[in-house]
């Protein structure tokens, strides 16, 4: 009888060869819930701006496990005791940290499931898998929830210098071609240490941390909050909201079985039983794309036009401003649209709207990035750095946007 080789080596364009550390991680990767992440894009609609940004949550999760292996080895080398059970739990927690993402990463959270975050759904998936794997994920779940007694382990999963950020900044920079985001994650990990049960960076790594924070700020303005990505994601959210609205009225919409289920059923966190979670696990980017290709011919004016805009990349006009958008400006575009197409105010609001985006590269007071000196002294990166702009990076910057149609829908 053939047995699968469970210690596979994967070739990654960022780090080269990645080794799967053990058979538990291999079995989780092979599971259909995790394989679904191959069909969930890491950067949502950003490929409409950066054509190379077609990488997936699957690639990102594998990259995070690789970095976690490096982190565990570095900390052990420096005398930090990490048991085999804790090591495996760290690998499982970082592997599954994004498993709850819906199609196009964030669009689902604001449209067809009622304010249910991907973190909450990730936890549901992990608990379900824990039953399937006879309790082998129990410690990983405790660490993922931030409830484990050894604080630095929770920080490796979720903090301002966790393995998640260390991978996605480098990976997204590579696939978009935006070199400003290219951080030295290996150097950062080599400088990691633990003091008073918290993660710290040795003072030799201070410049790598500075580069990391500057890169994060630039990636947010240049990539994640790029105005075209922004309007495309807003349109996608509105496509799903409109579809949900029509479904409530009993309008028949052609879509895949999983998408149809969520369109015609209200779903809050309390509704996520095993059956609904199983249905959610069948949803991915392809359900949404194929639905939009179908809906661009629908008789509903709003749904048809929103879908056409995304499919043909003929998006709304978008302007970013430093000050809040005046109501009169909004009214002007709305009135123009209503007059031209004889539609209602509610329908016009799908095409004319405002919002805001905030960029804060570093949050002081929220799990600070601390620098460890040779004499044992610990200092926050903003105080330790001789870069004046790090203080500026810790202040949130808000920009306001207005979206409205070009001359013709």
Image: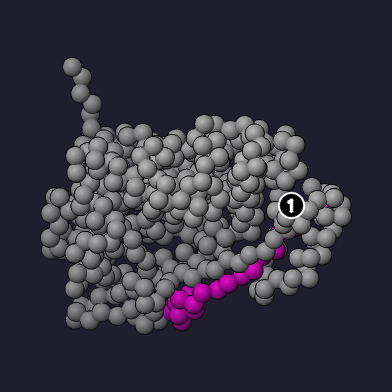
Q: Classify residue 145 by image quadrant.
A: bottom left
Q: Which residues are magenta?
A: 387-407
Question: Total of numbered circles in the picture?
Answer: 1
Figure colour scheme: one colour
Magenta stretch contains residue 403 = yes
At 17% from the left and 53% from the top, the residue drawn is: 86
Judge whether 386 appears above or below 231 on screen. Answer: below
User: Mark 1 sits on what residue?
Assistant: 347
On the image, the x and y values in percent for residue 235 come to 64, 50
On the image, the x and y values in percent for residue 332 come to 82, 65
Q: Residue furthest top?
A: 1
Magenta stretch contains residue 151 = no
Secondary element type, mark 1: helix
Let me know if residue 400 appears in the view.
Answer: yes
At 12% from the left and 54% from the top, the residue drawn is: 83
Q: Nearer the viewer, residue 122 or 85?
A: 122
């Amino acid at each position: 009888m053939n047995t699968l080789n469970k210690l596979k080596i994967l070739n990654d364009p960022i780090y080269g060869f990645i080794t799967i550390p053990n058979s538990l991680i291999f079995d989780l990767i092979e599971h259909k819930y995790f394989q679904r992440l191959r069909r969930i894009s890491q950067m949502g609609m950003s490929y409409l701006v950066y054509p190379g940004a077609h990488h997936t949550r699957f690639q990102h999760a594998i990259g995070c496990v690789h970095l976690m292996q490096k982190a565990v080895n570095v900390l052990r080398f420096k005398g930090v005791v990490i048991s085999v059970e804790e090591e495996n739990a760290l690998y499982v927690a970082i592997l599954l940290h994004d498993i709850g993402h819906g199609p196009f990463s964030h669009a689902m959270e604001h449209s067809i499931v009622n304010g249910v975050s991907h973190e909450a759904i990730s936890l549901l998936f992990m608990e379900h898998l824990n039953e399937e794997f006879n309790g082998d994920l129990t410690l990983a779940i405790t660490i993922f929830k931030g409830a484990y007694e050894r604080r630095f382990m929770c920080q490796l999963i979720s903090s301002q210098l966790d393995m998640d950020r260390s991978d996605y900044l480098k990976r997204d920079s590579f696939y978009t071609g935006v070199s400003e985001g290219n951080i030295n994650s290996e150097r950062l990990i080599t400088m990691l240490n633990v003091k008073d049960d918290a993660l710290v960076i040795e003072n030799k790594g201070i410049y790598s941390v500075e580069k990391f924070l500057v890169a994060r700020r630039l990636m947010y303005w240049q990539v994640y909050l790029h105005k075209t990505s922004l309007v495309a994601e807003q349109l996608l959210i509105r496509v799903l909201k409109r579809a949900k609205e029509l479904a409530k009225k009993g309008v028949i919409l052609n879509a895949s079985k999983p998408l149809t289920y969520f369109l015609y059923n209200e779903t809050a966190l309390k509704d996520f039983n095993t059956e609904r979670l199983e249905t959610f696990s069948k949803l991915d980017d392809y359900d949404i794309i194929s639905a939009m290709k179908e809906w661009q011919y629908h008789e509903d004016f709003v749904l048809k036009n929103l879908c056409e805009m995304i499919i043909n990349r003929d998006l709304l006009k978008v302007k970013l401003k430093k000050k809040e958008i005046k109501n009169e400006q909004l009214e002007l575009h709305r009135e123009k649209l209503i007059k031209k197409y004889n539609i209602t105010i509610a329908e016009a609001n799908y095409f004319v709207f405002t919002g805001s985006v905030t960029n804060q590269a570093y949050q002081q007071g929220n799990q600070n990035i601390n620098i460890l000196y040779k004499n044992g002294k610990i200092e926050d990166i903003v105080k330790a750095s001789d870069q004046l702009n790090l203080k500026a990076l810790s202040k949130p910057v808000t920009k306001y946007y207005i979206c409205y149609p070009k001359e013709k829908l």
